[in-house]
């Protein structure tokens, strides 16, 4: 089971992952993710709108460049943990026992990779019906492959 700081439960986070996040799909699952730290690569700090900054937005009278760097460094240094959710819909199985079994297996596989996953990510893993009959090794390999394709792993877990 994932420890409390690593659980994603906020409905708004799911909406953001769905609307603004990226996805990689496999035969067993789909991984959706969103980096919780804003990136401003290739953007002039003077052209960043207040709405793009969200909670990091400083008052207009301050030096925006300095404040953004300070705030982002503070957030990065705080070590915001990655939060992960496992979603198994009724399309996978009508039986709650089977859905819960799939969730437990995915969470156990995620726990293996948690130390290698980049910090400050929101990740949602959506199971497919093929998950009911797959082996543990297939599950682990597919999750590893999807996390690598997504660029969410810091290093090789094996």
Image: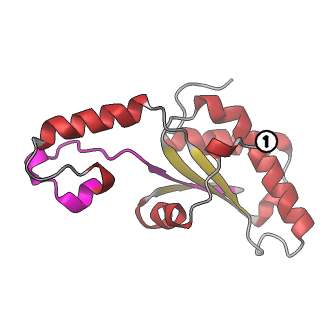
Q: Position of residue 76 (x, y in %)?
A: 39, 33
The residue at the point 55 percent across, 33 percent down is 153
| Nearest to the observer: residue 97 or residue 49 | 49
The residue at the point 57 percent across, 61 percent down is 10
Q: In the figure, is residue 106 to the left or right of 7?
A: right
Q: In the figure, is residue 3 to the left or right of 137?
A: left
Q: Position of residue 5 (x, y in %)?
A: 62, 43
Q: Quadrant of residue 26?
A: bottom right
Q: Is mark 1 on a helix, strand or loop?
A: helix
Q: In which quarter of the image is residue 136?
A: top right
Is residue 135 on the magenta stretch?
no
Question: Which quadrant is home to the C terminus?
Answer: top right
| Nearest to the observer: residue 151 or residue 69 | 69
Q: How many discs appear?
A: 1
| Nearest to the observer: residue 10 or residue 91 | 10
Compared with 115, 42 (above or below) is below
The residue at the point 51 percent across, 56 percent down is 23
The residue at the point 23 percent across, 44 percent down is 40
Please tell me how crowded label 1 is: few (under 14), some (14-19), or many (20+) other residues with Cα within 10 Å: some
Q: Where is residue 13 in the image (x, y as percent from the top left)?
A: 51, 60
| Nearest to the observer: residue 140 or residue 1 | 1
Compared with 49, 58 (above or below) is above
- Residue that badge 1 annotates: 108
**What segment carries the magenta color?**
29-53
Question: Which quadrant is home to the N terminus?
Answer: top right
Q: Quadrant of residue 64?
A: top left
Instruction: State whether residue 145 appears in this view.
Output: yes
Q: Position of residue 114 (x, y in %)?
A: 64, 35
Is residue 43 on the magenta stretch?
yes
Q: In the figure, is residue 89 to the left or right of 79?
A: right
Instruction: State whether residue 140 appears in this view.
Output: no
Compared with 137, 61 (above or below) is below
């Amino acid at each position: 089971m994932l420890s409390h700081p690593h659980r994603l439960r906020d409905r708004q986070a799911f909406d953001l992952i769905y609307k603004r996040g990226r996805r990689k799909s496999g035969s067993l699952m789909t991984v959706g993710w969103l980096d919780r730290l804003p990136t401003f690569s290739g953007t002039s700090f003077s052209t960043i709108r207040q709405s793009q900054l969200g909670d990091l937005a400083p008052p207009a009278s301050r030096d925006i460049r300095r404040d953004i760097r300070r705030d982002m460094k503070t957030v990065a240094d705080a070590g915001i943990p990655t939060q992960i959710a496992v979603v198994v819909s009724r399309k996978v199985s009508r039986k709650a026992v089977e859905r819960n079994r799939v969730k437990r297996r995915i969470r156990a596989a995620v726990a293996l990779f948690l130390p290698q996953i980049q910090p400050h990510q929101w990740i949602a893993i959506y199971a497919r019906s093929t998950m009911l009959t797959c082996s543990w090794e297939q599950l682990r390999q597919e999750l590893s492959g999807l996390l690598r394709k997504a660029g969410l792993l810091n290093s090789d877990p094996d």
